[in-house]
């Protein structure tokens, strides 16, 4: 039978020295460190994905407008 504070549990609770990071780090240095990890897209990838997004948004807007106009027309035909 094991006790609630077994050796395995203590190892999980207490971090090792090499895992410790400084507790206080400013917002700006932390932000800069995170931005260094970002994988920025190339110019060609950015352009092609922007075109794809604009195309899909336009297609969605047109399809919503068509459905809305159809239901508007149908309601005028029904409720004259």
Image: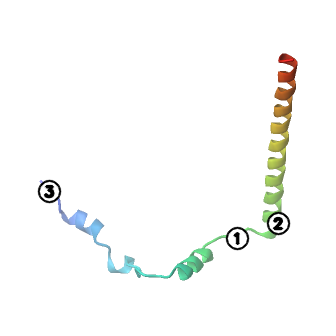
Please state which of residues 69 and 26 is positioned toward the viewer in this rendering.
Answer: 69
Q: Left or right: 13 with respect to 78?
A: left
Q: Please tell me how many numbered marks the rendered image carries.
A: 3
Work out whether 18 lies above or below 47: below
**Circle 2/circle 3 CB separation < 8 Å:** no
* Mark earlier in primary sequence (3, 1): 3
Q: Residue at x 24, y 64 (%)?
A: 8
Instruction: Say whether marks 2 and 1 touch (CB < 8 Å).
Output: no
Q: Position of residue 42 (x, y in %)?
A: 77, 69
Name above or below for residue 20 compared with residue 6: below
Q: Earlier in the sequence, mark 2 or mark 3?
A: 3
Looking at the rendered structure, which numbered label has been put on residue 40?
A: 1
Q: For the residues carrying marks 3 and 1, which lies nearer the camera in this image?
A: 1
Distance between the alpha carbons at the discs numbered 2 and 3: 60 Å
**Mark 2 Cα shell of 10 Å, populated few (<14), some (14-19), many (≥20):** few
Q: Secondary structure at mark 1?
A: loop
Q: Residue furthest left?
A: 1
Q: 67 and 12: which one is in front? A: 67
Q: Say which quadrant the C terminus sits in.
A: top right
Which residue is tagged 3? 2
The residue that label 2 is drawn on is: 44
Per the image, label 3 sits on a secondary structure element best described as loop
CB under 8 Å between discs 3 and 1:
no
Which of the 4 image quarters holds residue 2? bottom left
36 with respect to 26 (left or right): right
The x and y percentages for residue 40 are 70, 70
Q: CA distance from mark 3 to mark 1?
A: 50 Å
Q: Is residue 39 above or below residue 22?
A: above
- Give the SS element for disc 2: helix
Say which residue appears at 56% left-offset and 79% top-offset: 33
Give neighbour class at mark 3: few <14, some 14-19, many 20+ (Cα, 10 Å): few
């Amino acid at each position: 039978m094991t006790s609630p504070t077994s050796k395995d549990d203590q190892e999980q609770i207490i971090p090792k020295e090499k895992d410790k990071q400084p507790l206080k780090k400013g917002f700006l240095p932390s932000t800069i460190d995170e931005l260094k990890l970002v994988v920025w897209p190339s110019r060609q990838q950015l352009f092609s994905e922007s075109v794809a997004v604009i195309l899909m948004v336009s297609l969605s807007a047109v399809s919503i407008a068509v459905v809305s106009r159809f239901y508007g027309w149908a309601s005028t035909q029904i409720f004259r």
